[in-house]
Image (spheres, helix red, strand yellow):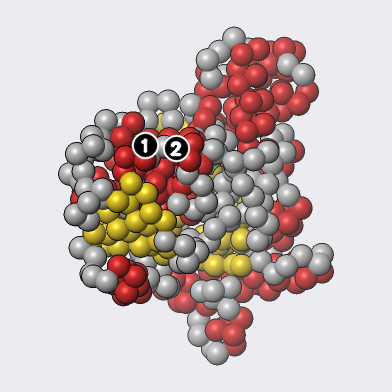
Amino acid sequence: MNDVSPATSADNTDPAAEVHTAHVVAEHGPGDLRGDVWRRFTELFGREPTSLYSAPGRVNLIGEHTDYNDGFVLPFAINRRTVLAVRLREDRMLRVCSDFTDELVELDLDQLNPENLNGWSAYPLGVVWALGEFGADLTAVNGVEIYLESDVPVGAGLSSSAALESAVAVALNEIWHLGFDRMTLARAGQLAENRAVGAPTGIMDQVATLFGEPDSAVFLDCRSLETQVVNLGFAEAGLALVVINTGVRHSHATGGYAERRQSCELGARLLGVTSLREITVSDLPRARDALDDVTFRRVRHVVTENQRVLDTVRALREHGPQAIGELLDASHWSMRNDFEISVDELDLAVETAQMNGAIGARMTGGGFGGAAIALVPFAAISRVQVALDGAFAEHGYAQPDIFVVGAATGAHRD
Ligand code: GLA
């Protein structure tokens, strides 16, 4: 575990105090990349950047595969960020570089075409193209130099891609004086992901990284695109949100994610509605009669998950985070058995956390790998970590990366 290790407790440091520190740690988290990004930019481009921007990854507390069904989600931005340095150029060249690869990618603004973008630079350059699709006059702007680094783990289901997209969107919105509001920037990030990267994802991740607030989740209605801030209050309740990254990599540009999306669209069509948002729990008996078993279970996941998001928001507001454990557990059950997007490592992480003191646990993100989250009382954190390490070793799985996250601010200039 990065933030709290058995070694720390053996040193007689109070684990609860340690976690609390981790929880309220500044939004840049343990590894603040800003100094490094400024320095690397200067070395690379031979002059200093004009500004730094950053955008966080996200954890989805609950509401999985509901966003593209016009439903409800409840993610929060985390204190792991992509940090970006930028400077306007005198010509029309886009030059982007990151510590993901050594490659410096160059493209003339007049050559932008989402079909020709590939590799990691499809994210930042895709955002440039998408801003144009939302009305930015890309014929009237100068090129930019961008260098970025990130401490959001890639492929862990914590939205490293949305962090990158949102950092770029916020930076260009300011440096090019585009005047877009945050929801338009979120939609541009989603369009970049859909068209330039080729992943048919919803809008949750970009909204989380742009609308996050400290110690709060973003309750988003994906049909109206209205957001509400919901206080989390984990630390006050003596709880920490523990991320368990299984290390099983996934990509939403291929395979299962798109298939699940198609099943949902089929279910909606067969039930005669434009989206599964229009189906409620009381419609499920009718849906069971109308659909084949697999489609019915996909539909049941989405319908019950929407209800669980609403129940979680109410529970947080009325009773605080101690009251949401069973909803997290039920969400995992539904993803494992009805939506079938979990993998053995995620199930092991969830079960081990549940059996060792977590009040609730579930996989988070699109599934097929990535991370689980567990809501754990401070006093049980060491036990959960030791148990996870032991269980993964026993099954012959690689050791998971375990760390505590806090809810942080969305994308902004630093
Ligand atoms: C990925 C996508 C999101 C959402 C989740 C599942 O993170 O990017 O849009 O669909 O999966 O809830």
Disc 2 is placed on an element classified as helix
Residue to which mark 1 is pinned: 130
Viewer-closest of 251 and 221? 251
Q: Is the shortest distance between ligand 1 and the CB of mark 1 under 8 Å?
A: no
User: Is tag 1's residue or tag 2's residue first in the polypeptide sequence?
Assistant: 2
Q: Is residue 9 above or below residue 114?
A: below
Structural distance between the alpha carbons of marks 1 and 2 = 9 Å
- On the rendered structure, is 285 left or right of 48? right
Identified by mark 1, the residue type is: Ala
Disc 1 is placed on an element classified as helix
In the picture, which quadrant includes the N terminus? bottom right
Give percent across and percent down for residue 105: 42, 56
In the picture, which quadrant includes the C terminus? bottom left
Q: Name the mark nearer the viewer: 1 or 2.
A: 2
Extreme residue in the bottom direction: 11
Cβ atoms under marks 1 and 2 closer than 8 Å: yes
Residue to which mark 2 is pinned: 114
Q: Residues within 10 Å of mark 1 (few under 14, many from 20)?
A: many
Residue 23 seen by the camera? no
Give percent across and percent down for residue 200: 54, 34
Question: Where ligand 1 lies, by image quadrant?
Answer: top right
Identified by mark 2, the residue type is: Pro
Name the disc covering residue 173, or none. none
Viewer-closest of 58 and 353? 58
Give percent across and percent down for residue 308: 55, 36
Q: In the picture, residue 190 is in which quadrant?
A: top left
Viewer-closest of 213 and 39? 39
For image coordinates 54% across by 67% down, the residue present is: 403
Q: Residues within 10 Å of mark 2 (few under 14, many from 20)?
A: many
For image coordinates 52% across by 23% down, the residue present is: 277
